[in-house]
Amino acid sequence: MATPTKTRRKKAKRTLQKGMLHVQATFNNTIISVTDEAGNVVAWKSSGSVGFKGSRKSTPYAAQIATEKVLEKAKDFGLNKVEVIVKGIGSGRDSAIRALLASGIETTSIRDVTGMPHNGCRPRKARRV
């Protein structure tokens, strides 16, 4: 009696021409995600996953490197048009957009969706430096 062999189906290579680039910039890290138009994540990188640790994760340079790496990955999928959505008030947001513009991918729009409280939760105490 011969044992049945399993046949593996090769995963179809996903392609997308238009996508969305989400930049979440916090005080401690910057997370860059590339999604398709439905919102499914195709590629992502963060300043920490690129190799920066501690306080260097929150620098603009770390956000720039993370953006370049994630755009390299996204170009493999055929991405050439992108809509940018920026969230947060960290220092990496501007340098992430600059790295995107330098990459040669066409940018259709840039939106800022940073949350603003309408007198909701009490803010944390003021930092004394």
Image (spheres, grey):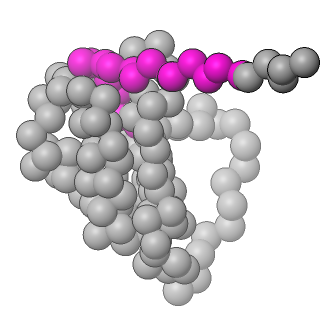
Q: Is residue 19 above or below residue 73?
A: above
Residue 106 located left or right of residue 82: left
Which residue occupies 45% across, 31% down? 42
Which residue occupies 29% across, 69% down? 61
How would you classify the magenta stretch by its main secondary structure?
Answer: loop
Q: Is residue 113 visible?
A: no
Q: Is residue 105 visible?
A: yes
- Where on the picture, by quarter, is residue 16? top left
Which quadrant would the N terminus be assigned to in this image?
Answer: top right
Q: Is residue 125 above or below residue 26?
A: below
Residue 12 is covered by the magenta coloring: yes
Query: Could you say where residue 78 lies in the image, as x and y percent from the top left?
Result: 24, 27
Q: Is residue 54 above or below residue 77?
A: below
Q: In the displayed image of the protein, which residue is found farthest to the bottom?
A: 129
84 or 68: nearer the viewer: 68
Which stretch appears magenta? 6-22
Query: Could you say where residue 46 lies in the image, as x and y percent from the top left?
Result: 47, 56
43 or 1: nearer the viewer: 1
Query: Could you say where residue 127 lies in the image, as x and y percent from the top left?
Result: 59, 75
Which residue occupies 36% across, 58% down? 66
115 or 61: nearer the viewer: 61
Q: How many marks?
A: 0
Which residue occupies 39% across, 21% down? 14
